Each structure stands twice: as C-alpha cells, then as structure tokens.
Image (tube, helix red, strand yellow):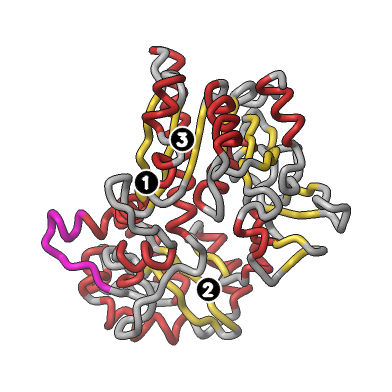
Amino acid sequence: MTAPLAGVRVLDFSRVLSGPFATMCLADLGADVVKVEVPGEGDDTRRFGPPFHDGISTYFLAVNRGKRSIALDLKSERDRATARELARVADVTIENFRPGVMARLGLDAGSLRAIHPRLVYCSISGFGQDDDRGGYDLVIQGMSGIPSLTGEPGGAPMKNGASVADLVAGQNAVQAILAALYRRERTGEGATIDLAMLPAMAALLVYHATGWLNGGTPPRRWGNQHPSIHPYGTYEAADGWLNVAIGTDAQWRKLERLLGWSSDARFAKNVDRVANREALDARLVPGLKSRTIEAWGRALEDEGIPWGPIWSAEQALAQVPLVTHDHPTGGRAVHTTPLPFRMDGAPIAADRRAPNVGEHTEEVLRDWLGA
C-alpha cells in the first residue's frame, strides 16, 4: 500500500503530548516527520518517569515512533536560520509552545508563511493564540465541564483517566492539517491553523451541550448511567460487573424476557424507562445479580443485546494488535498501540522507531537542504 502522506514533510517543533501525538499519527500515515529538539536534552517527556523501558521514558516512546530527530538550539540565530530553511521546504509545521514564543523566535505562522505561502502551519495551545496562558491537560479538562459530569452522583468532579484534552487536541490537529493539505492540492493555498484545547474539549459535550443550550436541561453527573437512555450503564452480576446498553425498545423487550418479567407499561418505551429509572433499577439490579458474567454474556449475545465486561487496562491491551519497534538504544523491543483503522486491509503504523536526541541532524540537513 502506498502510504497516504508519502512525500509530505512535517517540521515538528512540538513537545510533550498533544503535538507529538498528532505528528506520530502523521508519521504513521507516511509523512516524513522531523522532530526539532533541544540539543542534549530533547523533548521534556524523555525525562518523564517512572516507568522507563531500558532507560527510555515509556511516556516518550508512546507518541514518538516514526520520526527523525534534529537537534537545534532555537536561542541561537544560526540554528533559527536553519529552522527557517527547513520550514521553507516543509509542507507542514506544527508547534505547541505558549502563544508568543514562536513569534519572538521569528518562527511563527506569519513569518514562515511570508517566505513559504503554501505552508500549512498548525499551532496548538490551551486557549488560542490570543491568550498566552499555558494549556495543561488537567487545567483544560477542569474548565471543559467534563469532570463536572464524571464520577458518581454527589461525588467529587473527576478528570478522565487518560489525558484526553491533549489527545483530542492532537486528533483535531491531524484532522485540520489533512483538510488544509487537501485544500492546498486544489487551490495551492497554505493555511494557518489556530487550535485551542478548551473548545476542542467543550465540543465533546455534544448532547449534554444541546440539552442545555436548546432544552434548558443542566447537565449533571450520572456515574455510569446515561441521562437520556435507560437501562444503559454498569450493573453487578453474581461474580463481577458488566455493562448493559439498551438502545431500543425491542432490545428492552428481549431483556425483559431473559429476566422472566411480564411486560410493564412503566418501562415500555425509553422515555418511560428514563422517567421511572429508580423503579426499574429496583427490580433490575437484583435480577442481574442472579447470574454470572459469563452466563449473562451468552444470554445477551444470543439475543443481540449490547453488553460487555469491565476490563482492566491490561486486559484491554491484550486484545489490541500492537506495533513493535526496536529500542532506541538497543534494549528490549518497544510495543505501542497503532492507529485504530486499516486502509486497504493493512494496519497503519510507521516503520521507524522513536529517535534519540539529534540522531538524524546530518541526515535531515542533507535530505531536506542538500547541506
């Protein structure tokens, strides 16, 4: 399979998570990603740990496969000039510094697109380029409204266990960059992308947002239940926990039969089940406790009722087809999670392992600048 982004050059000034996640996805799609790092130090995440894998931060390994590393000291005019020359021959430049930093270095979108109008320049920040506050995942999650909806009713607000503000920003960056590259193919015009983490997270409120904005219903914490569908949540079986997701009235009638219940008008339609959720759960909770997870799984599967066990992260990763690369310094092989789709039947992942700091400086200067 020809890689979709084969021949696309990405100059990557980003570090930590949101930007590196985005550029790893672009590398997986075939782009030549050159990661600009501080000489000797590299990306901050190289020091994030434990855990480490044979001396390398597993945090760094998670989002940096497929890239070449070039060491440039952006405080040096000589190295800034080199960065500008690299940008002149790049297709995409991406950065996630605090707003204003790249302008002070002369490496902002305006400066670089003035010498290269076809450049797609993507900036990721917490609040947009007009606001110089730092954008940290925990802070952005807290301001997004999502932790106020997460956790048990009456409990403390709870952030997502994954760094979703960073990761959603990275995914949105990929989407925006691909759209800009597609437009450039038709018009020859580059783009300046201002991607802010806070609105990216707020967009995930989806039906919670429209319920409030258009229906006047304040979103609130439901634990593992759903505000508009019932039963749709986590229930205890005889030997553990499982999720049951009743999305249609037909599925509900099947579950009633499995439970041995006669039809009850209070629960006939979803709107009735939502209105009478406490009465329904008073019967459903002990009913589901009557069988094991395995027994319920077989019965629900046979009836086509959506359900699933509650897996640990270790159990979930055992089901994922992993990507394996060499260790940057010759240690044990490195396993990471791939892009979640196949194209033309093939899995999508870069062939190149994560780089050492500045490992490809001479190679990149030769390939991109002929130096």
Could you tell me which quadrant the C terminus lies in?
top right
Q: Which residue is mark 2?
A: 242
Q: Which residue is mark 1?
A: 100
Q: Residue at x 72, y 43 (%)?
A: 358
Secondary structure, mark 2, is: strand
Tag 1: residue type?
Answer: Gly
The location of residue 207, given as percent across then percent down, is 26, 55
Left or right, 3 with reference to 19: right
Gap in angstroms between the C-alphas marked 1 and 2 = 49 Å
Tag 2: residue type?
Answer: Leu
**Mark sitting earlier along the chain (1/2):** 1
* Bounds of the magenta segment: 210-220
Q: Which residue is mark 3?
A: 107
Gap in angstroms between the C-alphas marked 2 and 3 = 51 Å
Query: Eyeballing the image, is 3 above or below 274?
Result: above
Residue 279 marker:
none
